[in-house]
Amino acid sequence: MPVLVIVAIHGHTVTISTSPVASESRKHEDAERTRIVIEVKNAGNTVIVKLDNEEASCNSQIAALASQSKLSATATAAALKKGHDDFNTSVAIYVNEIKADEDELEHLTVVTTQTEQEFLIRIREIQVIALGDGSHTATLITVCQTILVEIQQVIVVVQPAPGGAEGDDGD
């Protein structure tokens, strides 16, 4: 542990005292770095929870389509699984981006409050793009709605034509 030695000469008396100045400064820097990393991770985790909630919401909307299906149970299950998988892939992109930012921050040797702000802004941008903010349309809501329409086209709207093949006029 580095120690600063202070020598004070008062007349004929010499006073020597130790002061852990460098060590205390390093402890403060470590504590500040830890605080910043935790703050950014908490912000990232909060957004990940919101992304998970959006995924659960979309998945429940997808599952609700099963009752409208005109297809077999197997074909319906396959269409619903594809919808779940497609939406999960869309959510995973944002979750992975947040986790990559958190990992990058942990591996930086110098972390300042400016670094903290930069990472918090990046996480906020991901949140706004993925989940919207009132003035911006949420990408994930658009993706979910698209998936719901696609599933409806497969399991509800598209059905075999009664009495023959498509395009058969009966001539």
Image: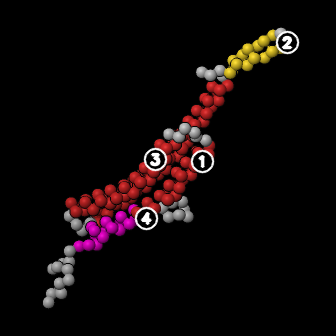
Residue 145 among those drawn in magenta: yes
Tell which residue pokes out farthest to the right in this image.
Answer: 11
* Kind of residue at badge 3: Ala
Q: How many C-alpha atoms fall within 10 Å of the one at disc 2: few (<14), some, or many (≥20)?
A: few
Tell which residue pokes out farthest to the bottom in this image.
Answer: 171
Q: Which residue is mark 2?
A: 11
Separation of marks 2 and 1 at Cα, in angstroms? 52 Å
Q: Which residue is mark 1?
A: 117
Separation of marks 1 and 4 at Cα, in angstroms? 29 Å
SS class of the residue under badge 4?
A: helix
Residue beneath the point at 57% across and 37% down = 33
Q: Which residue is mark 3?
A: 100
**In the image: residue 125, left or right of residue 71:** right
Separation of marks 3 and 2 at Cα, in angstroms? 61 Å
SS class of the residue under badge 1?
A: helix
Give the image location of residue 168, x and y in percent. 17, 84
* Kind of residue at badge 2: Gly
Residue beneath the point at 33% across and 67% down = 150
The quadrant of the rendering that contains the N terminus is top right
Residue beneath the point at 18% across and 87% down = 169
Q: Which residue is mark 4?
A: 142
The stretch in magenta equals 144-159
Give the image location of residue 140, x and y in percent. 43, 60
Q: How many C-alpha atoms fall within 10 Å of the one at disc 1: few (<14), some, or many (≥20)?
A: few
Q: Earlier in the sequence, mark 2 or mark 4?
A: 2
SS class of the residue under badge 3?
A: helix
SS class of the residue under badge 2?
A: loop
Quarter where residue 16 is shown:
top right
Q: Earlier in the sequence, mark 3 or mark 1?
A: 3
Q: Nearer the viewer, mark 3 or mark 4?
A: 3
Q: Nearer the viewer, mark 1 or mark 4?
A: 1
**In the image: residue 157, left or right of residue 53:** left
